[in-house]
Amino acid sequence: MAGKHSPRVKYLRRLALRRFREQEGRFLVEGIRFVEEALESDWPVELMAISPGLPESRRGAALLERARARGIRVIELEEGLFGQLAETDSPQGVLAVAQQRRMLLEELRTQPLDRPALLVLIDGVQDPGNLGTIVRSADAAGARGVLLLKGTADIYNPKALRATMGSIFHLPVVQNLTPDEVFPFFERSGIKTVAGDPRAERAVYECDLTGPCALVAGSEAAGARTSVLEKAAERVRIPMPGRAESFNVAVSLSIMLYEAIRQRGL
């Protein structure tokens, strides 16, 4: 049984830090359903840490059996220690250490091409919950991937992961990119970039989204940087006839994604 001075417990604590996650290429998955999703998707999981009571439930016991069948090491934590490591208010008694999948942009070109490419480019979104919701919406819309420019929140932040509701295991997410990498890739791939901008003259409904395209959204406070907007092929706004000043960035991106779906007849 692992105590608070165990090297593995100290390792779990350090994975709460973005810098350490990026250095190690690992992240934490918390909760029974979330760990089940990771195992069902064949995501590379290396370690599971459990509370003493997890095997007492049928679902917990089944999860343990599945992990051991895959050769995943399982450590049991001392009573009371799990709550100190968990990020949730009501921890379910299981944490897993999983590998980050680091894709290259060019790998997105080899994804299934049964319909025109639909990608999402995020510039500077800071709230992990918003970022996770964007990934979830992109997954639901059938997007091919989500690209994150440097300065954007970490998709492996625990709050961001929870907000994806498991979509992190289904949809490629590429982090720490620069505009000088991304826009030449779009050009080589024949992908039109369409940026959300409340100052744009055209509404999103007037823009042709039936062909390969990447939808661009920026930070909650300032939107995408001018240097990013200038590289976009088109800028569009979402009409707001009411009195609200703006949409949440995740809501705005979802509206744009589903306008693309509508135009494509999906």
Image (spheres, rainbow, N blue to C red):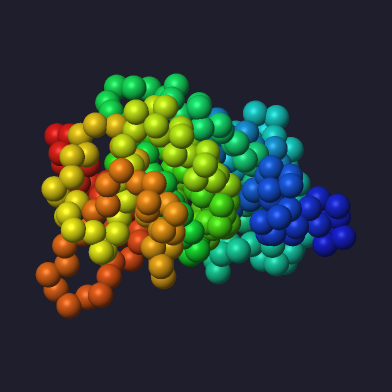
Q: Give the percent coordinates (x, y) of residue 193.
A: 33, 42
Report if residue 62 is visible in the image: no
Report if residue 233 is visible in the image: yes
- 233 is higher (above) or lower (below) than 124: above
Name the foreground residue: 9 vs 171: 171
- 217 is higher (above) or lower (below) than 233: below
Q: Give the percent coordinates (x, y) of residue 51.
A: 68, 56
Q: Give the percent coordinates (x, y) of residue 52.
A: 70, 55
Left or right of residue 85: residue 205:
left
Name the foreground residue: 75 vs 124: 124
Residue 247, quarter of picture = bottom left
Tally the marks. 0
Residue drawn where x is 68% and y is 44% of the image = 26
Residue drawn where x is 51% and y is 32% of the image = 105
Residue drawn where x is 58% and y is 47% of the image = 176
Left or right of residue 108: residue 35:
right
Q: Give the percent coordinates (x, y) of residue 171.
A: 44, 38
Residue drawn where x is 39% and y is 27% of the image = 189
Left or right of residue 52: residue 171:
left
Name the foreground residue: 8 vs 134: 134
Quadrant for the C terminus in the image: top left
- 129 is higher (above) or lower (below) than 109: below
Name the foreground residue: 126 vs 195: 195
